[in-house]
Amino acid sequence: MTSLGTGIINEFFYDSSHFQKGQASDFFVFYNASRLLLKQKSIYGSQDADTPHMYGRYSYIPTFVFLTAWIGFFKPYASYILWIVLIETSLIASIILSLKWKKKHGFQISDNFLVFLWLIPSPYYLELFMGQNTFLFAFLLFVFLLSQDLFRGRWIGFISFSLSIISKIASIIYIPLFFRKKQYAIILAPLVFTAVTSAFYFTVMDTARVTIQGSSSYVSENIKTGKSIYKMPMAAKADKTDETVHIKSPVNFSVRLPRGIYITLNHILKKPQSLYYPQVPGFSSLFYNITGSIDLFRLSAIIMWIAVYSLLMFRPGDYILDFSLLIMLFFITFTFIWEHHYTLLIPFMVLIIIREPSVRLPMVAAYLLVSAPTPFMLYNPALLGWISMEHNLIKGLFYYLPKSSAVIIGFSALLYLKFSKIRNLHEETA
């Protein structure tokens, strides 16, 4: 909290010293969209007069802005402080709920150690600095996982999971688990709500449209990231009321869409194309540094998702274990993992550490790697600056290995735990 005001530890992280436009820049994406919504303008439009300059354009579904419109009623930095209070309140609630859950089931783990686990992750600082919603998303999933144990009735879990889908689309990776248990309402309700509110916004409120035309030769942005140049469809320019965007397509076609739909789809679809960013400390960067192959990474990711989903169709169904396994797989196969994204792992790893003594040691080791800062200080000219991230395999490995090792260790431990539970069930049945 001191560093949020002084910046004393900002240089230890790429996200807070080089990448971002400034403190709270991610938060001001939501703030700007909320201000535009309150003024009945397109949330995908240009900068509102009250929004600080360090912001990016909103590129997600409109439903989330409907839920966060309240932040637009306040001055920008007052609103940012309220957002930090909300994140901090979620952290305190997480600590209280985990202690209550631990005591209810009599799990053998120290209360002090449990609190320690919640308070040490350095990516959480980046969450506060950038004003992100990743930890809030993780908290909603955390509440869902504990709802059946700690709360009477299913409505709290139902609401929390529904809000998680609205806050980040990553929740869709859990949909097959609900189909397995025939819990269709918890899937359909938030999806229908999102579809209805989005349809209302795009048909009634967002009048700015863009014409999409297919073409064998298409206009594109050249996005140079480290070793390779990637071609991505051009984003619509929000300053114009109408324009044509050409995208690569095997057949020619033309369709008019609200600009918000195009920007959102473009944002979602272009991310898988962005495999290698030297500053992204994810497994995809490690993989690409070693193999230099995008296609091999994508093929491996598809095979792993098919294999894990097939595994999870076995009994016993265990939401805490299965959710944790899928989120670890998400970190292994997703290509856009910045350091602040690791706050998403915090609740899942803490739950497994509390409940599963058989894998507690490797999970704690993985959690400590997640919690520690990357060795960015060695790459940062403002600190040591001894190493260049780009075009050097050995030096690059040193940067990517800590966080990559964490997800590999955690994923392996969870797989071992899942197979052990399946084996025990078979032995009991026999």
Image (tube, rainbow, N blue to C red):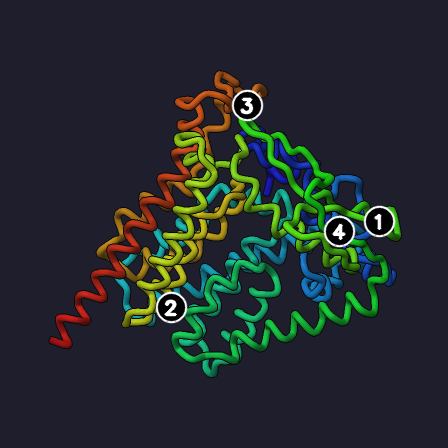
**Residue 176 appears in view:** yes
Residue 243, disc: 1
Up-down: is 170 above or below 28?
below
Q: Quadrant of residue 305?
A: bottom left
Residue carrying label 2: 319
- Residue toward you, 41 or 232: 232
Residue carrying label 3: 380
Helix, strand or loop at mark 2: helix
Q: Residue furthest bottom?
A: 153
- Asked whether, in this view, residue 2 is left or right of residue 183, the answer is right
Residue 26 at x, y = what percent?
67, 46
Tell me whether the residue at label 3 lies in contact with that at label 4, contact meaning CB atoms closer than 8 angstroms: no
Of the two numbered discs 2 and 4 in the rendering, the one whose residue sits closer to the viewer: 4
Mark 4 is on which residue type? Gln
Mark 2 is on which residue type? Tyr
Residue carrying label 4: 213
Residue 150 at x, y = what percent?
42, 74
Residue 383 at x, y = what percent?
54, 21
Residue 134, disc: none
- Residue toward you, 426 or 97: 426
Q: What's the CA distance linking mark 1 and mark 4?
A: 11 Å
Label 1: how many Cα within 10 Å (few below 14, some 14–19, many 20+) = some
Mark 3 is on which residue type? Asn
Q: What's the CA distance linking mark 2 and mark 3?
A: 41 Å
Tell me whether the residue at label 2 lies in contact with that at label 3, contact meaning CB atoms closer than 8 angstroms: no
**Residue 371 appears in view:** no
Helix, strand or loop at mark 4: strand
Tell me whether the residue at label 2 lies in contact with that at label 4, contact meaning CB atoms closer than 8 angstroms: no
Q: What's the CA distance linking mark 3 and mark 1?
A: 41 Å
Mark 1 is on which residue type? Glu
